[in-house]
Image (cartoon, rainbow, N blue to C red):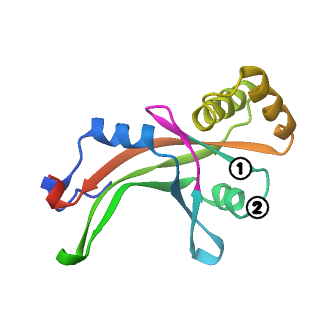
């Protein structure tokens, strides 16, 4: 179902892909947008080892796209070092493919937003984090992407 990587020597091991997803702070979520156009949106996330969680408003282009077609891809660029003397870049990136669902269960939604909050504000107090979540709870929507395929690649120079 998913394509094999042509340049197999550049393929990243699953452990390296996981490391990049755990460390990354943002990526681009690609969805089936309006009128058949792709919709790719930069977004923060948290990775659980099997799933990705994203926050969203309850309405908008992203939610409309997810409701239209749950299939998505998510790309995180770990490195993109320009090497002008070689007319190339030394890159490393990961793409996850999967399906997205809107978290309806309050406990699941709370777990997801708490993990997201801890990732981006690890030194904040639990009390302050809870207060911030409560302030944004009503308009908050959490999305979960179940990963079906993970692919990572790096520049041949980094192999």
Left/right of residue 4 with respect to residue 77 in the rendered view: left
As for residue 26 lying within the magenta part, the answer is no
Report the side of 154 relative to 149 (left or right). Answer: left
- Residue 53, quarter of the rendered image: top right
- Highlighted magenta segment, given as a residue range: 43-52
State the residue position of label 2.
Answer: 60
* Residue depicted at 33% across the width and 42% down the height: 17
Asked if residue 102 is positioned above or below residue 9 in the image, the reply reads above
Residue 24 image offset from top left, x and y in percent: 46, 45
- Please rate how many residues cluster around mark 2, counting C-alpha atoms within 10 Å: few if below 14, some from 14 to 19, many from 20: few
Q: Residue at x 47, y 56 (%)?
A: 73
Nearest the eye: 129 or 28 = 129
* Residue underneath mark 1: 56
* Label 1, residues with CA under 10 Å away: few <14, some 14-19, many ≥20: some
Specify whether residue 46 is painted magenta.
yes
Depth check, front residue: 128 or 30: 128
């Amino acid at each position: 179902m998913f394509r094999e990587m042509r340049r197999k020597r550049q393929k990243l091991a699953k452990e390296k892909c996981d490391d990049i997803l755990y460390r990354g702070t943002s990526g681009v979520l690609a969805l089936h947008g309006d009128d058949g156009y792709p919709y790719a949106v930069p977004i923060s996330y948290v990775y659980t080892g099997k799933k990705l969680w994203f926050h969203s408003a309850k309405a908008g282009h992203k939610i409309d796209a997810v409701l239209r077609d749950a299939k998505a891809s998510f790309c995180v660029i770990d490195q993109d070092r320009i090497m002008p003397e070689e007319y190339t870049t030394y890159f490393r990136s990961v793409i996850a493919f999967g399906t997205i669902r809107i978290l309806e269960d309050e406990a699941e939604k709370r777990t997801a937003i708490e993990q997201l909050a801890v990732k981006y504000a690890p030194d904040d107090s639990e009390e302050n984090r809870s207060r911030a979540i409560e302030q944004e709870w009503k308009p908050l929507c959490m999305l979960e992407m179940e990963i079906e395929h993970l692919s990572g690649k790096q520049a041949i120079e980094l192999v």
